[in-house]
Image: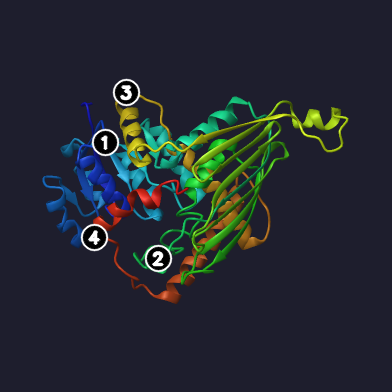
Amino acid sequence: MSGTVRTAVIGVGNIGSIHARQIFAGNIRGMELAALCDTDREKCRGFETVFPGVPVFASDGELFENSRRLGLDAVIVSVPHRFHTEIAEAAFARGLHVLCEKPEAVELRCARRLNEIAARSGKVFGIMFNQRTEPLFARAREIIKSGAMGALKRSSWTVTNWYRTQTYYDSGSWRATWDGEGGGVLINQAPHNLDLWIWMLGMPERVRGFCYQGKYHRIEVEDEATVFAEFPGGATGVFVTSTGEAPGTNRLEMAFDKGKIVLENGLLTMTELSVSERDFCFTSDSGSGMPEMTVRTFSYEAGRDGHSLILENFAAAVLTGEELISPGYDGVNELSVSNAAYLSSWTDRWIELPMSDGDCDVFSGILEEKSRDEKKKRGEGARAGDKDMRDAENEYSRRWSARW
């Protein structure tokens, strides 16, 4: 392979257009823009001006048929959620490396199948969990994984500053639909946070979800959700998210046997106990005393945007075997929690993880029914066209950052 990864962007909408611009401008080390693909023919006609000399294709099938002629090495899949696995599978079948936008799929069963196909292909498989590059989250994970804080007791994350207006939801016919996105805030905005939650603390054992559809917007899917989780060893967790609160809150608190970690307002505050709380509880002769503690604070360190870092890391994984920051296989983790939260809310029960084949069947049946009912209710007409690339570029860092 040459010194660059020749990459095609499939789906040149809001985020896909920014990836394309970054690569075309030479801002992504080790990556070269080899082709563009989008089914919107009117949009494609404008690419010649923005991306002169870059071949444009109107379908992924046409792109893949020409992949060898183009010298294509990899694709970035940034189409509506429901098509992620279908296109990624086709790319692997062509011997291409794949970087997929989140979520990996709408349904957990599809993500599991894609992971199997990716493993058999032997190709690099990444997913765009760009917030893993945020220094405070990375530092928190490092502290937790070191064992310095001891066993997890409880976690709570209120991330309600994913505010969206009705105009946002009207910006594309696939947005905020069961048929297009496969859900609302849990599958569109919150995958980043769910991924980080699991990345730091590990997978829960069971989930109970409460999802509120169209509570703040004229949409059929949820714009507010509360998820309760139980982790191995008895630890508990609460995850609250919404697109209907302004200004909203982003606060993550994690309690451990030897202290706690809080992330809020661009700060990580680590309170470390001198001894285990469990030991202190049963050996202290004081009725209400506390162990001695040390408080340390780490501030947010602004750097390059996470999308660019993930793109460069993906290119390095292809070229040199560098370890992926965000392996595509990890996509099943946050999707397991969001699928379980939906199913729990729909069936009014706890859902055990990993989800069984039977629960996956129930999930698929209810989702299909919701999609069918939604189509009947709104018809097949689109609400509006997608925003143009300039709008997407202006919102790039604002919409997809950690948003302290």
Which of marks 4 and 3 precedes in the sequence?
A: 4
Q: Position of residue 27 (x, y in %)?
A: 24, 37
Left or right: 88, with 225 as reference point: left
Secondary element under disc 2, as helix, strand or loop, is helix
**Distance between mark 4 and mark 2 Cα atoms:** 19 Å
Left or right: 336, with 393 as reference point: right
Of all residues, the one furthest to the top in this rendering is 320
Task: Please say if the residues under marks 1 and 2 sit with CB atoms less than 8 Å apart.
Answer: no
Disc 3 versus disc 2: nearer the observer: 2
Amino acid type, label 3 = Thr
Which of marks 2 and 1 precedes in the sequence?
A: 1
* The N terminus: image quadrant: top left
The residue wearing badge 4 is 40
Image quadrant in which you'd find residue 309:
top left
Amino acid type, label 1 = Ile
Task: Please say if the residues under marks 1 and 4 sit with CB atoms less than 8 Å apart.
Answer: no
Q: Position of residue 197 (x, y in %)?
A: 55, 42
Which of marks 4 and 1 precedes in the sequence?
A: 1
Amino acid type, label 2 = Tyr
**Distance between mark 3 and mark 4 Cα atoms:** 35 Å
Which of marks 1 and 3 precedes in the sequence?
A: 1
For label 1, the crowd category at 10 Å Cα-Cα, with few meaning under 14, some 14 to 19 and many 20 or more, is many
Secondary element under disc 4, as helix, strand or loop, is loop
Q: Which mark is residue 169?
A: 2
Disc 4 versus disc 2: nearer the observer: 2
* Residue 265 sits above or below residue 241 on the image: above
Amino acid type, label 4 = Asp
**Distance between mark 1 and mark 2 Cα atoms:** 30 Å
The residue wearing badge 3 is 320
The residue wearing badge 1 is 28
Secondary element under disc 3, as helix, strand or loop, is helix
